[in-house]
Image (cartoon, rainbow, N blue to C red):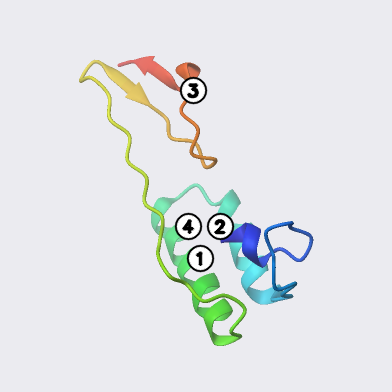
Amino acid sequence: MREALRSDSINNYGKCRAPNSMRCSIVADREMDPAARNALLAKASRLAADDVALIVTHYQINMWAAKKNLAIVPRMDEHTLAMSVTPK
């Protein structure tokens, strides 16, 4: 979503400028609490939809799996790297 809302992004095909929703998504990037981050992203989605800056067609949900004795830290860019996997 942040790539579609940032005015300087190459993925902002409509050249939209939605400063309130962009601000929410930037703050959400820094938020460590999952519930607070989801609330900020939901607010950004609402603001963008109200401005018709972005028509949300789906929400991307990523899943990772690992053996019971391994822990994986998911990345925001959706890449899975060996260094993200550690023993429990």
In terms of sequence position, does the residue under pointer 4 or pointer 2 come before the other? 2
Q: Is residue 12 above or below residue 69?
A: below
Q: Amino acid at mark 1?
A: Leu
Distance from disc 4 to disc 2, alpha carbons, whole Å, reads 5 Å
Residue 17 quadrant = bottom right
Q: Quadrant of the C terminus?
A: top left
Q: Which residue is mark 3?
A: 81
Q: Which mark is residue 40?
A: 1
In terms of sequence position, does the residue under pointer 1 or pointer 2 come before the other? 2
Determine whether label 1 and label 2 are within 8 Å by CB. Answer: yes
Q: Amino acid at mark 3?
A: Leu
How would you rate the neighbour count of disc 3 (Cα within 10 Å): few for under 14, some for 14-19, many for 20 or more?
Answer: few
Nearer mark to the viewer, of 3 and 1: 3
In terms of sequence position, does the residue under pointer 2 or pointer 3 come before the other? 2
Furthest-front residue in view? 13
Residue shown at 71% from the left, 63% from the top: 6
Distance from disc 1 to disc 4, alpha carbons, whole Å, reads 5 Å
Is 23 left or right of 67, judged from the image as shown? right
Residue shown at 33% from the left, 23% from the top: 71
Q: Which residue is mark 4?
A: 37
Q: Quadrant of the N terminus?
A: bottom right
Nearer mark to the viewer, of 3 and 4: 3
In terms of sequence position, does the residue under pointer 3 or pointer 4 come before the other? 4
Distance from disc 1 to disc 2, alpha carbons, whole Å, reads 6 Å
Residue 74 quadrant = top left
Q: Amino acid at mark 4?
A: Arg
Q: Position of residue 38 (x, y in %)?
A: 43, 60
Under circle 4, the secondary element is helix
In terms of sequence position, does the residue under pointer 3 or pointer 1 come before the other? 1
